Amino acid sequence: MTPNFPTLLREIAEAVKSEFGKGKVANYIPALAKVPPNKFGIAIETIRGEQYHLGDAMERFSIQSISKVFTLAMAFRLERKNLWKRVGLEPSGNPFNSLIQLEYERGIPRNPFINAGALVVTDILLEHFAGPKAAILDFIHTLTGQNDIQYDEEVARSEREFGYTNAALANFIKSHGNIHNSVEAVLDVYFHQCSIAMSCQELARAFLLFANHGVVPATQERLLTSSQSKRLNAIMLTCGFYDEAGEFAFAVGLPGKSGVGGGIVAIIPGELAIAVWSPELNEHGNSVLGIKVLEMFTTLTGMSIF
Ligand code: GLN
């Protein structure tokens, strides 16, 4: 039986209110620090085409590291298993922007969702596309049917200006030969992909690809094999929340991905995608209310992958 989602979402929104003020809006990217901390939205999109939303679910925000799922899906389509020669598949147990592991592992990042791994994935897109920035947007437009989803140039510029750690990661990987294009070019695309602005509703719609085993439900277009979709979901489950991936799997029990803009998207294979936005982050860079909402969602509905 399908749960009564509108009632459930209202109940969850009421219950998580007490979590406001417990986290901090990302301030290491100055343009993100301006986002009001009390923004809050939830959107559910089901494979069958039902839509539910609450609060600021239609307002666009910076998707940040959620973009790493889109670029990984694109690179996986192109490179297939060759991709795993350049980036690993193990949870890192380290913060998303950590440099430490990279030295031990000689420039082969632990997984595609820490920044180091995402930079390699972006480098791969630069090898395949003459216009990688346009290609990334095209992919997202195909997933959502929303052709006006765009880069936020102010956020991209702001991140580039203070992007010393990402520049250090990219230079280090390049010194090991695992970035093939210029560091400048890779960082430019990476900062742009992170700056993409989407709403909860659009994110949930886009992630239906992974809930629907590689087929866009609205158009029936197959973009991934079901095996590729399964594997991307496995990486989301094990690595989507960096050094909080274990806790997220424990509390929520769904594959998902977070971003420092305060967004989290999670999927239930064969059923639905759910996106939450609340900009206050915990010490791992994951949305405090986002995690709480998803924890309540799987607990109250009994829906999870386990
Ligand atoms: N653009 C951010 C960075 O590279 C993305 C990090 C994140 O969302 N976890 O630092």
Image (cartoon, rainbow, N blue to C red):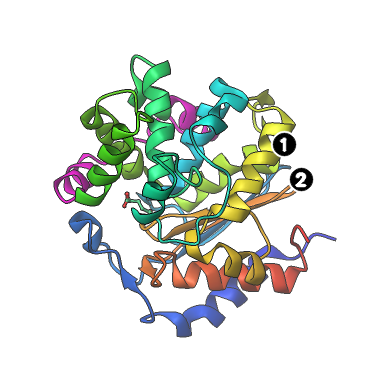
Residue at the far right in the pictured view: 1
Q: Are marks 1 and 2 in contact (CB under 8 Å)?
A: yes
**Residue drawn where x is 37% and y is 28% of the image:** 123
The answer to whether residue 212 is seen in the rendering is yes
Give residue 243's mark: none
Residue at numbered disc 2: 270
Q: SS for tag 2?
A: loop
Please say if 58 is above or below 109: below
Residue highlighted by disc 1: 213
- Mark 2: which amino acid? Gly
- Where is residue 13? Give x, y as percent: 54, 74
Viewer-proximal residue, 23 or 58? Answer: 23
Q: Quadrant of residue 275?
A: bottom right
The residue stretch that appears in magenta: 138-163
**Magenta segment includes 156:** yes
Q: Is mark 1 within 8 Å of ligand 1?
A: no
Q: Amino acid at mark 1?
A: His
| Residue 191 shows in this picture | no
